[in-house]
Image (cartoon, rainbow, N blue to C red):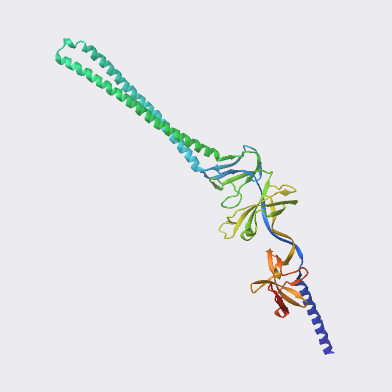
Amino acid sequence: MKKDRIIFIAAILTSFSSCQLKNKEISSVYTVGNKDFENSIFIEGIVEPTLFTTLSCPMNVNGTITYLVEDGTMVQEGETVCIIEDDNSENNYDNLLLALESVNAELSKRKADLQMQYALLEAQVKNNEADTQIANLDSLQLRFVSPTQRRISELELERASIEKTRLGQKLRSLEIINRSEIRTLEIQIQRLTNRMESAKKVLDGLTIKAPKTGLAIVSESRRTRSKLKEGDDVWNNMPLVIIPEITEMKVKMMVNETDFKYISENDSVSYTFDAMPDNKAYGRIIRKLPVGQPLQRDSKVKFFEVEASLDSLLQLPEPGFTADSRVMVNYIKDTIVVPQIAIFEVDSMKVVYVKKNRKYELRQITTGLSSQKESIVSEGLKRGEVISLIQPHASLISGERLFSGSVHD
């Protein structure tokens, strides 16, 4: 009785083991057939306008935001969207204003001094003319005086003539000096005025207004990679607010280095949108930026910017919507495709194990396009053949077939 019980238990265990092996065998094989090969990459993107107006921090400005319009606000033409405070620009304008006032005062003083000198010199000229006239009257009486007195009168006339010549030269020199000094100050004033006008434009530019009506989208900070806010530092030509043209959109994606290598321009893309579940869209890759950037500061992992068009859609999404993007890297219709786990490497050859009754044949193959899950087999397999998804034990391998045509059993 005990012996019969042992035999019964052994039979049950054998049956159970046989069932397990059979189920394992069924789940570990794959029947080769033709199917469409697809190699897709799924990336999350952000909807952005294709055309937009960017309002940036003015040139030569390094300041702080004191007012910023709320992100996503509809603004009217001429409405203030951002105000920047820049101490350097304000100090520069104040210093130029003081310098201009100082030079204007100097010009007024110089003109007054030169006019006084000119008036004094003209008075001297008139005195000289009067002395000359008197000396000429006295010369009429020279024939009645002594030779000595006559000589004195002649010397006085000669001195008056010399003085007249000297005063004339001094007047001409003063006029030249007058024109030169005033011209120098006028040029200095013109330069300061031009610099002041430029400084005033910079100050006026610190109050940034919308050039047209539209949706105001706040830009990201170059330091924090988050939306700008009041109190943030901004500098030369940094984007502050974007006003998009909402008639045409695109999708921007940040792609890791591995996926970036497989994506090419003109690859087709399909989209779905979390905020618009019933909306679908299609487009293509239109631009790849070759320079990677860290997603976060000090990160060694680089991501690359990729842009895709929105060509065909049910409804135009709004800027800022998340787009689940499926990039079709490769698509081959009706070809032999096998799982990657069924392909093994033996002696630098790619092989599969083809089921032959209860044994397996090692078969060399040639692969074509591949994805992470599947690979096209261009040579070595036929439709309907069954291959193993796991490497069989050596005792189960009955032979091999290589491209040389030799078959070993």
Position of residue 272 measured from the top left corner of the image (x, y, whole percent): 72, 53
Instruction: Pinpoint residue 350: horizontal percent, then vertical percent.
Output: 67, 71
Residue lying furthest right in this view? 1
Image spot of residue 108 (x, y percent): 40, 28
Q: Is residue 63 above or below residue 290?
A: above
Q: Residue at x 69, y 53 (%)?
A: 323
Residue 248 position in % (x across, y down): 68, 45
Q: 395 and 103: which one is in front? A: 395
Q: Is residue 379 left or right of residue 300?
A: right
Quadrant, the N terminus: bottom right
- The image shows residue 393, relative to residue 195, as above or below, that is below
Does residue 135 lie above or below 102 as drawn?
Answer: above
Which corner quadrant of the image does residue 154 belong to?
top left
On-image quarter of the C terminus: bottom right
Residue 390 located left or right of residue 297: right
Does the rendering let one see residue 52?
A: yes
Left or right: residue 96 compared with residue 338: left
Q: Quadrant of residue 122?
A: top left
User: In which quadrant of the rendered view does residue 39 lie?
Assistant: bottom right
